[in-house]
Image (cartoon, rainbow, N blue to C red):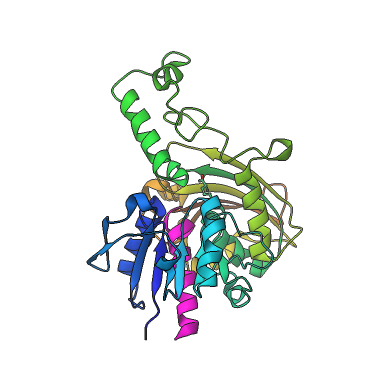
Amino acid sequence: IRPTLAVVGATGVVGTVMLQILSQHADIWGEIRLIASPRSAGRKLAVRGEEVEVVALTEEAFDGVDVAMFDLPDELAAQWAPIAAAKGAVVVDNSGAFRMDPDVPLVVPEVNPHAIRVRPRGIIANPNCTTLSMIVALGALHAEFGLRELVVSAYQAVSGAGRAGVETLRQQLSLVAGTELGTHPGDIRRVVGDSTGPFPEPVALNVVPWAGSVREDGWSSEEMKVRDESRKILGLPRLPVAVTCVRVPVVTVHSLTVHARFEGEVTVDRAREILATTPGVVLFDNPAAGEFPTPADVVGTDPTWVGRVRRALDDPTALELFVCGDNLRKGAALNTAQIAELVAAEMA
Ligand code: 11C
C-alpha cells in the first residue's frame, strides 16, 4: 500500500511549488490530501493531473496520513505539527519553529541524509531557503577540505517573503514603469509611499539590507538562521559564520557571495572538480565567455549553481564563490519533497 501524503499550506507560494514537484517526480504516493486554512477550503488545485479539493486544517484532516509536508507560518506550524505527529504522521516542516530543536533533525538529503533516522518528536525540519541555496555546494567542499569559517552575503528574492513579497515588488514596478524615476533623489520613496509590504523600504530599483526580524546586537533573524542552521547541518557547532542578508528586486532565486576558509591550502582546480561532480550542483563558471549563474537563468531549476570560483588572493586556504539557488524549489518545496520521499522509502 502506498503511503498517504498531506500537503499542509497547499495554497501558498511554496505549497504551489510542492504540488508542481509532486506532479513531476515519480509517483510514489497513494492519496495526496491538500490542507489549508479554512478560508481556502473547497478550492480545487491540480496535482498529478487531477483536481483535488482543499480541506480545512483540523485534527481530523490528519486521519490516515503517513507523511505530512508543512509550509505554514511559524506559530501555526508550532501548533499543528505536533498534532499531526501525534496522529501518526511523520511531519516534514518548512517553518522556523523546530529547526534548532535538538530532538528534531534538520536535513538536506545530499549533505546529511542519515539524520532523518533519529526523530523522537516525529518531526523533521527543512532548512531556511537562504541556507539551502548554498549548503549542497558547501557540504561537498567541506567533505573534501574541512570548513573552518564562512562569510556570506545573501541577495534575497522577494518570493522569500511569500505572496505578499511578490505582489509588493510587482506593484512597485508598475508604479515606476515608463517613468524617469531615479533621476531625483528620493523619487522611489515618494512614488511608493507607505506601500512597502513586508519590506522596511521600497524594493523596486533598490536594495534593502534587511530580512526577518530584529535580533540582538544588530543581527537579523534571517542572518542568525543561516548561521545556526549551517552549523547544525554540517555538524560544526562552533563554525564561525558571518552573514549579511539583503533583499533585492528579484522575484525568485536567492544569490549568495561566499568566502569559505578551510583547514589547509585549496586549489581552484580541485574545487571545480568537486563542484562539477557533486549531485545537485552545477558548476557554471567561465567569465571570459560571460558564463556565471544569475537568477534569470537559475529560476525554475533544481540544482545549486556555482560560478566565479576563485582562491582568495591573500589566503591560500580560502575560496570565493557566487552561488544561486531557486528559493522556492531547492530552497523550500523540493528539499521538503526529497525528505518526504526518503521517509516514504523507509515505509516501503
Ligand atoms: C526570506 N528566507 O527570504 C526568508 C523566508 O525561515 O523559512 C523564509 C523564512 C524561513 O525572507
Q: Residue at x 41, y 15 (%)?
A: 183
- Locate residue 212, reporting x and y percent: 57, 41
User: In the rendered image, which quarter is residue 232 located in?
Assistant: bottom right
**Does 125 sit above or below residue 193?**
below
Q: Nearer the viewer, residue 149 or 51?
A: 51
Q: Magenta residues: mostly which secondary structure?
A: helix
Q: Which residues are magenta?
A: 327-348
Q: Indicate the position of residue 189 as horizontal and vertical percent values.
A: 45, 20
Question: Quick one: 109 or 321, which is closer to the camera?
Answer: 109
Q: Is residue 203 above or below residue 190?
A: below
Screen quadrant of the C terminus: bottom left
Instruction: Using residue 271 as the reference point, say whether residue 195 is left or right of it.
Output: left
Question: Going by the picture, which residue comes out furthest to the left?
Answer: 50
Q: Is residue 341 magenta?
A: yes
Relative to residue 93, is residue 182 depicted above or below?
A: above
Residue at 43%, 36% (x, y): give it. Answer: 249
Residue at horizontal 64 percent and vertical 74 percent from the top: 120
x and y, in percent, of residue 47 in the image: 28, 65
Q: Report whether residue 69 is seen.
A: yes
Residue at left 63%, top 44%? 221
